[in-house]
Amino acid sequence: MTETEAFPVAGLVLAAGGGRRLGGRPKALLPHRGRPLVEHAVEVLRAAGCARVHVVLGARAAAVRARAELGGCVLVENPDWADGMGSSLRVGLDSLAGTGARAALVSLVDQPGIGAQAVARVRAAYEDESSLASAAYDGVRGHPVLLGAAHWAGIVATATGDRGARAYLKEHEDAIGLVECGDVARPYDIDTEADLAHLE
């Protein structure tokens, strides 16, 4: 059995944001538990069972490479990161093409309240390349999102601005398996100065 067959779900961290509402501090480099936030995001995916992890960088990518310990990850730079999350999702999924991964488990770097327990639940929803699943919080869809490889082309074709896969998922809502995670995770974002209180 190859590594791909044993671990068909690859982790994909979207970590390119420039932190516009945080005074231009890239979210990947925000300190959390003594280390850059992007390291925490990678560790969560690995603890949830993703052996392969791709990280999309953008704002101050060179500084992130220098400061964060991301050994073993595939680092992908999105030159158009300022266009929004959609461009990072496209770059990330493109980087997984040809790797043998059969699904991508997509997480956002700025959601440290979502730990390995919740991520593992969503990962467990994988069945095959047609799988679509999402964490839910009190029934409301959130992250992480599991995107089977059969959906990547459609997502890449429709991911624009800050909407990410939203348009594609809305069209395929009936196919999405919702995995309730509200009992084990808090899905807040680190978007503003006030949100920094969530970091440790």
Image (tube, rainbow, N blue to C red):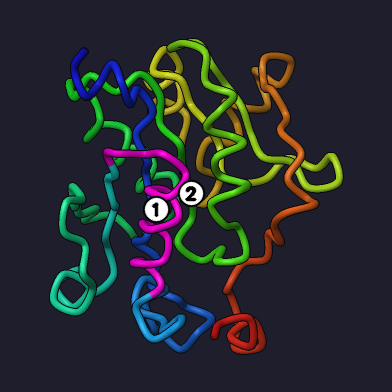
Asked where in the image residue 98 lies, by quadrant, the reply is top left
Front position in the image: 84 or 63: 63
Q: Main secondary structure of the magenta part?
A: helix
Q: Secondary structure at mark 1?
A: strand
Counting from the top left corner in percent of width and height, residue 149 is at 39, 18
Counting from the top left corner in percent of width and height, residue 141 is at 73, 40
Q: Which residue is mark 2?
A: 107
Counting from the top left corner in percent of width and height, residue 102 is at 35, 18
Front position in the image: 59 or 137: 137
Give the left or right position of residue 56, taking residue 9 as reference.
Answer: left
- Please tell me how crowded label 2 is: few (under 14), some (14-19), or many (20+) other residues with Cα within 10 Å: many
Q: Which residue is mark 1?
A: 14
Q: Which mark is residue 178?
A: none
- Please tell me how crowded label 1 is: few (under 14), some (14-19), or many (20+) other residues with Cα within 10 Å: many
The residue under the point 80% across, 42% down is 140
The residue under the point 43% across, 50% down is 47
Q: Nearer the viewer, mark 1 or mark 2?
A: 2
Residue 39 lies in the magenta stretch: yes
Tell me the magenta residue range: 37-52
Q: Are marks 1 and 2 in contact (CB under 8 Å)?
A: yes
Outermost front residue: 1
Tell me if residue 26 comes above or below residue 15 in the rendering. below
The residue under the point 52% across, 21% down is 126
- C-alpha distance separating marks 1 and 2: 6 Å
Counting from the top left corner in percent of width and height, residue 164 is at 50, 42
Quadrant the N terminus occupies: top left
Quadrant the C terminus occupies: bottom right
